[in-house]
């Protein structure tokens, strides 16, 4: 499909609609645009929950760089408000993002999300790229922008981005809030925030912590949060905001959760010689065209045959520590001209101890061969962005131009083992050994790592630099009925690698990218309640890995389009977006599992793949009554596959971890009568169709379809002159056993959460 021609044709059709619909012009009040809209307000650069009504947000900041009405922007936008985050008791972002159509999360690996079929690190905090999906500390709202957003974001995946916005201090206000939560598996969480605001200076401070066990073997989580933000009106039209945060988390590494796979002809076949790998046996017995893995392997005990509660070894862990400093200064130079400075410094330190190697591939007798690996990355990032926004009129039309520069530098230090062959080995490993999960106790990861002769005796430093220069123009024609957005971004990316000593397998090719990514879109208001829109964009992204010989991966080029309808009907009680989308990524390097098995080295890649996804997304927010809220999300993929590859067997393979259909709903009803005043009931469900476990011809195992149900009850009351909210959440009410995400990990069983919150 020719994406550019399709989008241009759609935009031309939209531009022609004023002629076709001239007879309806009187249905759109010309007063929708007023003189006040021609003047830039400082508040446009700080969208908060105050602009949301319950679960329905009216404006977003991520797609355009400043506050804009969602219904006026030709981009598919989903916003999850702070109230919704609290009502679903989401302690991590993935628990909330599950309700966004086209977005899939993983219970095992919190950083990875799938948007429109494409998996990656696509998370931002206050508009600055972060590599981790955080817990929901101090979170005001989450904005999900579909498509590449290629003007205001740099090297991104074309499926979309997730940007969460923290709560900001409030002027002329002295207040606070606190919340404590207790739940299943000895879950304990506490959070407190305080705001002190005068006329020109406001400060917000917060702290919190989590201490919890879990339902898996040796499962645990320990986390603390400390944050502070300051807003200072330096001048009458100048606002300085500084945001500080640190998060420290230690938990059992969930990538060590058991996700074993095998072949039905091979597993428990007594004719297979001991120690023979599945691929070797299949090839030798006339099954060379059969997939290596076609089932999840039931090799554990009879009460848990698929290892739902099993972790591959004791004392595995994932450690994460972050420090963040955000600085933003907005200066209104005139009524139409604004300068914005954003700077960010962040430290993200990781260390992981987990199972690795053959741990997903049991032998025919059900034994598993694996070892433990210890990995770490220490990442320092620096950002400096400058942006100018200018609003002007040409005749009866209004235009807002944005132009600016972004710069980011990232140092990533990775400790490794300088092996006897002079190679750099990422991490350090214990010895391979065979484990029988039915008869033997769990192995101890820390002990086996300590017994290894390998130590961290070398560092690799990656130095990444990203610069972007962009210009964007948003325009209004025909008294605001026709709105367009367009622009381009010039991206410059480079990465160099350095080692403490000479290695025989350095990253011999350092990726460099110079590319321009355009975006064009238009929205036409058919009447006061319905708008149609179309958008086309392109993206570019480096592939940051390298193969076992140190060869870096090529740049991926992406493109995508959206054609849809937005509505705001029934006096604002019904709003939503229906979108047909198409996304393509070209130049992808995919893991070559067959070569990895044959050589016993990893990673190896197949180069030059193209992946595509197309589908329909529906997002609706409906208030049947003032005290009743309903959210519905639906996605249907009409295409999600590898459409081109240098290996013919890969063509047509479904994208991994991306179900064809998902349906979610959440509702909340507030009782307004004398007997039940203060009570609220809510709940929802998530349905997912089955999904391919991996985009690999050697793996045909599928994650089965599932439906989970959550419920919530609230009671609002006063005590001691303060407002309190008591809340009960039951997650996975029916205790559904299900897998989800790109790794096929088990979702959480039924859990109870009780919380008490107050404002002071």
Image: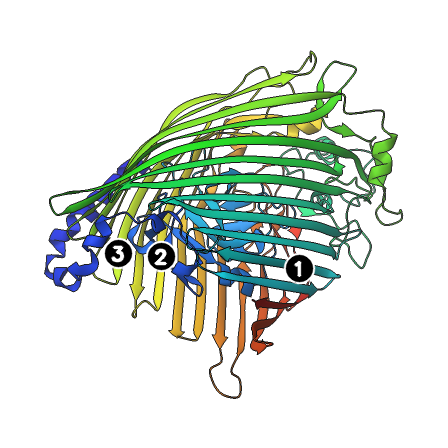
* Lower position in the chain sequence, tag 2 or tag 1: 1
Tag nearer the camera, 3 or 1: 1
Residue closest to the eye, 696 or 417: 417
Dot 1 corresponds to which residue?
Answer: 190
Q: Are marks 3 and 1 in contact (CB under 8 Å)?
A: no
Q: Is residue 327 left or right of residue 301?
A: left
Q: Is residue 546 left or right of residue 161?
A: right
Dot 3 corresponds to which residue?
Answer: 531
- Circle 1: element type: strand
Q: Residue furthest bottom?
A: 675
- Circle 3: element type: strand
Q: Is residue 743 visible?
A: yes
**Spatial distance from mark 3 to mark 1, Cα to Cα?**
44 Å
Residue closest to the eye, 180 or 333: 333
Q: Residues within 10 Å of mark 1 (few under 14, many from 20)?
A: some
Q: Are marks 2 and 1 in contact (CB under 8 Å)?
A: no
* Lower position in the chain sequence, tag 2 or tag 3: 3
Task: Reply above or below: 183 against 42.
Answer: below
Q: Is residue 2 visible?
A: no
Q: Are marks 2 and 3 in contact (CB under 8 Å)?
A: no
Task: Reply above or below: 203 against 760.
Answer: above
Q: Residues within 10 Å of mark 3 (few under 14, many from 20)?
A: many
Residue at the image point whose x is 29% and y is 35% from the top? 487
Q: Residues within 10 Å of mark 2 (few under 14, many from 20)?
A: many
Dot 2 corresponds to which residue?
Answer: 577
Q: Could you tell me which quadrant the N terminus lies in? A: top left
């Amino acid at each position: 499909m020719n994406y550019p021609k399709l989008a241009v044709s759609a935009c031309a059709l939209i531009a022609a609609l004023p002629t076709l619909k001239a007879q309806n012009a009187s249905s759109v009040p010309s007063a929708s645009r007023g003189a006040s809209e021609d003047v830039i307000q400082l508040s446009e650069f700080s969208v908060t929950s105050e602009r949301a009504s319950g679960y329905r947000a009216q404006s977003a900041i991520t797609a355009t760089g400043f506050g804009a009405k969602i219904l006026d922007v030709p981009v598919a936008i989903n916003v999850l408000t702070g109230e919704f985050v609290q009502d679903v008791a989401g302690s991590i972002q993935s628990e909330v993002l599950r309700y966004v159509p086209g977005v899939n999360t993983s219970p095992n690996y919190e950083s990875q999300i799938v948007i429109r079929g494409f998996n990656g690190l696509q998370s931002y905090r206050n508009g600055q790229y972060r590599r981790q999906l955080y817990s929901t500390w101090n979170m005001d709202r989450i904005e999900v922008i579909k498509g590449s957003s290629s003007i205001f974001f740099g090297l991104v995946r074309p499926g979309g981005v997730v940007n969460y916005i923290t709560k900001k201090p409030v002027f002329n206000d002295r207040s606070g809030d606190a919340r404590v939560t207790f739940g299943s598996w000895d879950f304990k969480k506490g959070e407190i925030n305080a705001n002190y605001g005068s006329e020109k200076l406001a400060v917000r401070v917060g702290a919190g912590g989590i201490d919890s066990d879990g339902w898996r073997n040796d499962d645990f989580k320990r986390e603390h949060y400390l944050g502070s933000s300051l807003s200072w009106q330096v001048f009458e039209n100048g606002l300085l905001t500084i945001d500080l945060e640190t998060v420290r988390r230690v938990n059992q590494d969930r990538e060590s959760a058991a996700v074993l796979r095998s072949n039905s002809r091979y597993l428990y076949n007594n004719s297979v010689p001991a120690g023979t790998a599945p691929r070797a046996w299949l090839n030798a017995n006339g099954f060379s065209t059969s997939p290596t893995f076609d089932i999840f392997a039931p090799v554990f005990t009879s009460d848990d045959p698929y290892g739902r509660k099993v972790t591959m070894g004791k004392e595995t862990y994932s450690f994460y520590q972050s420090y963040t400093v955000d600085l933003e200064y907005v200066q209104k130079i005139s009524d139409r001209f604004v300068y914005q400075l954003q700077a960010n410094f962040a430290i993200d330190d990781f260390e992981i101890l987990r199972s690795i190697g053959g741990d997903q591939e049991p032998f025919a007798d059900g034994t598993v061969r694996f070892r433990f690996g210890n990995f770490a990355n220490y990442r320092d990032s620096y950002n400096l962005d400058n942006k100018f926004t200018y609003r002007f009129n040409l005749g009866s039309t209004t235009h807002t131009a944005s132009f600016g520069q972004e710069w980011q530098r990232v140092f990533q230090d990775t400790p490794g083992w300088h092996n006897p062959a002079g190679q750099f080995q990422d991490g350090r490993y214990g010895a391979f050994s065979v484990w029988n999960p039915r008869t033997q106790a769990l192995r101890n990861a820390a002990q086996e790592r300590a017994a290894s002769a390998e130590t961290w005796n070398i560092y690799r430093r990656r130095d990444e630099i990203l610069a972007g220069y962009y210009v964007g123009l948003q325009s209004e024609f025909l008294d605001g009925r026709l709105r367009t957005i367009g622009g381009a971004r010039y991206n410059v990316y480079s990465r160099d690698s350095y080692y403490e000593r000479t290695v025989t397998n350095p990253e011999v090719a350092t990726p460099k990218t110079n590319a321009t990514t355009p975006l064009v879109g238009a929205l036409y208001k058919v009447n006061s309640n319905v708008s149609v829109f179309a958008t086309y964009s392109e993206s570019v992204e480096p592939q940051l890995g390298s193969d076992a010989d140190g060869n870096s991966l090529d740049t991926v080029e992406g493109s995508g389009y959206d054609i849809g309808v937005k509505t705001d009907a029934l006096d604002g009680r019904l709003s939503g977006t229906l979108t047909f989308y198409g996304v393509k990524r070209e130049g992808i390097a995919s893991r070559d599992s067959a070569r990895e098995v044959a050589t016993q080295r990893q990673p190896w890649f197949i180069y030059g793949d193209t992946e595509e996804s197309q589908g329909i997304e529906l997002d609706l927010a409906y208030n049947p009554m003032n005290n009743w809220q309903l959210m519905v999300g639906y996605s249907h993929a009409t295409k999600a596959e590898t459409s081109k590859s240098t290996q013919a067997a890969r063509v047509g393979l479904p994208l991994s971890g991306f179900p064809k259909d998902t349906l979610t709903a959440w509702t909340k009803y507030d009782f307004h009568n004398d007997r039940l005043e203060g009570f609220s009931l809510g709940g929802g469900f998530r349905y997912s169709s089955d999904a391919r476990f991996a985009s690999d011809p050697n793996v045909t195992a599928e994650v089965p379809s599932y439906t989970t149900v959550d419920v919530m009850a609230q009671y609002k009351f006063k005590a001691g002159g303060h407002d309190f909210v008591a809340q009960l959440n039951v997650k996975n009410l029916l205790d559904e056993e299900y897998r989800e995400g790109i790794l096929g990990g088990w979702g959480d069983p039924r859990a109870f959460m009780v919380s008490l919150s107050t404002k002071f």
